[in-house]
Image: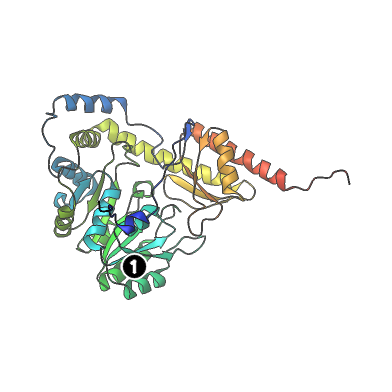
Amino acid sequence: MARMRLKPSVLNAAKYTFTRHDQDIKLDQNEAFDDVPERVKIAVLARLREVAWQRYPNLRAERLQELLAQRDGWDAEGILVSNGSNVLLQNLLILAGIDRSLVIPEPTFSLYRQQAQMLGVEAHGVPLKPGSWELDTPAITTALATRPAGLFVVPAPAAPTGNRIPTDALQTVLDAASEYGWLSVVDEAYWAYDGQHALDLIRGHDDRIALRTLSKADGLGGVRLGYAMGSPTTLTELSKVQLPFNVSIFQQVAAETALEMTESVQAREHRIEATREARDHVIAALRRMPNVTAYDSVTNFVLFKVPSAAAVYHDALKAGVVLRRQDHLPQLEGCLRMTIGTETENACALDAIERSLVTLNDDRTPRGGAA
């Protein structure tokens, strides 16, 4: 019997891992701090009772496309919905990356490089400027000019660093990508918490796409929906790569209801404002702690550096708080990430971090003893 042959690019790729913990305070996945309103859930269930479950869903979630277009000020023909923006990223790598290249700033979302590796796409990371996490526009331009044109992805706001990408810097690298024949993707997963977006840089360009998600500010992480925004011409090509009927009736009904109901729209607005206020408080509190560097953020999370990420992470876990280690990523030695939670959750997390730092400092303090 012949031996089964699997692709070496998959066998050699690292598996995306995530460990779920039982602690009550979960601040490790950049989720919304609150759930959607109960009336919205009731309305979703009522609508689902009226849907024929034996029928396939709409091919491209057309009603959902229209609602997103109305909210985001975009042509519905230039929107493609999928069951998660990471699925769209995979589709974009198939569309423009295979047998070519992927260029990304780093540190960044690990899935970019992982998916590229499994699809046999050569990935090239360009380091962000240390500490400020700004784009190194000359280095990115050089990378785009010297590699086989494929897919260029830049998260704005940046992740996992959380900082704003200035419009002029973003325009510079997008223009360079256009000059050298790349398809550019601006991953805007956290744009709502910032308020600044890149749609004006996308509009009118067939070689530029924005990715957005309903998992963050919309509070629908469990529904798993993302969408691409670009020119109808380019999204028609992207839709060829996407598997048909890939957004279920349950996903479509949940998202349509959330976008239509006033309670959900108002909850989103409150969620964004409350997160911004709490984020600034968390950054200020971290900066008052000794031996902590808290970086600027315009997202719903904060990246911070401590003397020992492993020690603070495990101490927080013992205190019932789950943070996210980032110290395995390039340039992020000693770094942890904290999602902005409720007022109580944030207070507990800050207390756990501070207590851990006191313990670390005590352990490093020389102690007298018998000779």
Left or right for 86, reference 347: left
**Residue plotted at (63% across, 41% down):** 356
The image's colouring method is: rainbow
Q: Nearer the viewer, residue 353 or 169?
A: 353
Q: Quadrant of residue 200?
A: bottom left
Q: Is residue 44 above or below residue 80?
A: above
> Residue 263 location, x and y as percent?
28, 30
Quick one: label 1, few (<14), some, or many (20+) residues within 10 Å?
many
> Residue 178 location, x and y as percent?
26, 69
**Residue plotted at (45% across, 37% down):** 341
Q: Is residue 1 above or below residue 200?
A: above
Q: Is residue 110 above or below residue 256?
A: below
Left or right for 157, reference 48: right
Residue with the mark numbered 1: 173
> Residue 28 location, x and y as percent?
45, 41
Give, as a three-letter code, the residue at label 1: Val
SS at badge 1:
helix
